[in-house]
Image: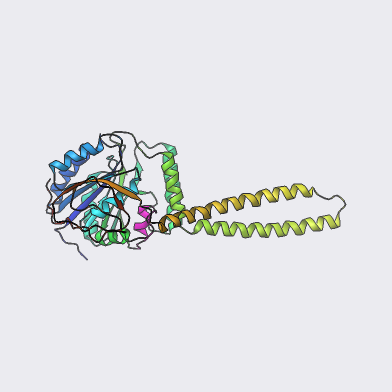
């Protein structure tokens, strides 16, 4: 099915301490827009509670360009939560998300749009290589994406993705997901729609320092593990194997005691067996506890992010407990804290706002 040649493209960009990169990124997007005509473009920046002047820099762009939107989160919630917040207000028939550090080349967007226009509702930009990436980071990335593909049983590029273009249908499906704590690329892959893949070489950071710390990497690994039932099944199989081994060892020990005069050190065997079983029980309890904690967060409807301010947005996303109806006023600058959880049916479409690049 061919997509219409005239459409609105929403570009969602999470930002964290990117004041040195925002203007350069916007300039490249502005140049790209001329190639995309007659496509209408809106750029949705989501400030993940930066500590530098990122909000001020993007605020200036908002005042100069009515097609630039800005959300600021009340706390640092992670890039995946920031992308979800951007999805809430994105109005385009196609929605693209990318990093704000210029490691993902905006010039690739035109090629991704062509794939979308061929009928692919998910277009992954798969990195083939990262220039200047340390061996340690390259190894972690490789192992993580292999793990993600295996655990999620999802159609994901094995080399990893940080950059994708989605059809409106996919965005609505992701926003409707109940598992809001999962990594966003797993939520996308879980829709089951056949993707297209565009390869590119990831560039070094243009400026600033990456906020992708070891703590955040480990948190992403845990979230990915808990997205699947595989850890629980591994614990179940490990428990069954240990029970079987214990029975075999018990039989062997009994036969040894009955047939020989030199009895083995029984207490040593008991201590070792008890230690192994105790460690397995603690690990199993920890895994189950993580699942229960995530289930509790979902049950309590704990917001993944809270919006502190919104610029050039007709209606900021609100909590699904009490969705706000859009008012008739034009653009808002809301300082009121608004919870963002699931897709809000009352959000006003922005597709009528023309590109003002």
Is residue 139 rendered magenta in the image?
no
Quadrant position of residue 309: top left
Q: From this viewpoint, which residue is outermost toward the bottom?
A: 1
**Residue 252 appears left or right of 208:** right
By secondary structure, the bulk of the magenta-drawn segment is best described as loop
Residue at 25% over, 52% down: 96
Q: Nearer the viewer, residue 327 or 44?
A: 327
**Residue 272 appears left or right of 25:** right
Q: Position of residue 156 (x, y in %)?
A: 37, 55
Q: Quadrant of the N terminus?
A: bottom left
**Residue 274 appears left or right of 86:** right
Quadrant position of residue 88: bottom left
Is residue 185 rendered magenta in the image?
yes
Q: Position of residue 135 (x, y in %)?
A: 43, 37
Decide if residue 247 is in sight here: yes
Region rendered in magenta? 177-192
Determine whether 29 is above or below 225 in the image. above
Q: From this viewpoint, which residue is outermost toward the right?
A: 261
Determine whether 279 is above or below 103 in the image. below
Determine whether 179 is above or below 100 in the image. below
């Amino acid at each position: 099915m061919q997509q219409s040649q005239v459409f609105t493209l929403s570009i969602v960009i999470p930002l964290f301490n990117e004041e040195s990169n925002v203007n350069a990124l916007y300039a490249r997007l502005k140049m790209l827009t001329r190639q995309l005509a007659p496509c209408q473009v809106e750029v949705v920046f989501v400030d993940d509670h930066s500590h530098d002047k990122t909000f001020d820099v993007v605020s200036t762009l908002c005042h100069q360009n009515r097609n630039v939107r800005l959300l600021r989160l009340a706390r640092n919630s992670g890039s995946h939560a920031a992308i979800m917040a951007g999805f809430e207000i994105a109005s385009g028939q196609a929605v693209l998300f990318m990093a704000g550090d210029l490691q993902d080349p905006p010039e690739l967007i035109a090629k991704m749009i062509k794939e979308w226009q061929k009928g692919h509702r998910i277009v992954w930009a798969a990195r083939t290589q990262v220039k200047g990436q340390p061996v340690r980071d390259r190894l972690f990335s490789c192992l993580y994406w292999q793990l993600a593909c295996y655990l999620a049983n999802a159609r994901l590029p094995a080399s990893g993705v940080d950059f994708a273009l989605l059809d409106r249908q996919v965005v609505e499906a992701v926003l409707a997901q109940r598992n809001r704590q999962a990594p966003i690329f797993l939520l996308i892959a879980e829709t089951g729609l056949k993707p297209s893949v565009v390869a590119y070489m990831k560039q070094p950071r243009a400026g600033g320092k990456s906020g992708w710390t070891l703590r955040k990497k480990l948190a992403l690994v845990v979230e990915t593990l808990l997205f699947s039932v595989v850890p629980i099944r591994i614990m179940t199989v490990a428990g069954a194997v240990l029970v079987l081994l214990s029975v075999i060892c018990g039989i062997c020990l009994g036969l040894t005691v009955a047939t020989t005069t030199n009895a083995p050190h029984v207490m040593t065997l008991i201590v070792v067996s008890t230690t192994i079983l105790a460690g397995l029980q603690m690990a199993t309890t920890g895994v189950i506890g993580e699942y229960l904690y995530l289930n509790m967060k979902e049950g309590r409807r704990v917001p993944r992010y809270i919006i502190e301010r919104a610029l050039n947005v007709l209606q900021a996303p609100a909590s699904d407990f009490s969705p706000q109806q859009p008012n008739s006023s034009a653009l808002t600058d809301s300082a009121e804290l608004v919870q963002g959880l699931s897709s809000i049916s009352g959000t006003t479409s922005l597709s009528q706002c023309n590109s003002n690049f």
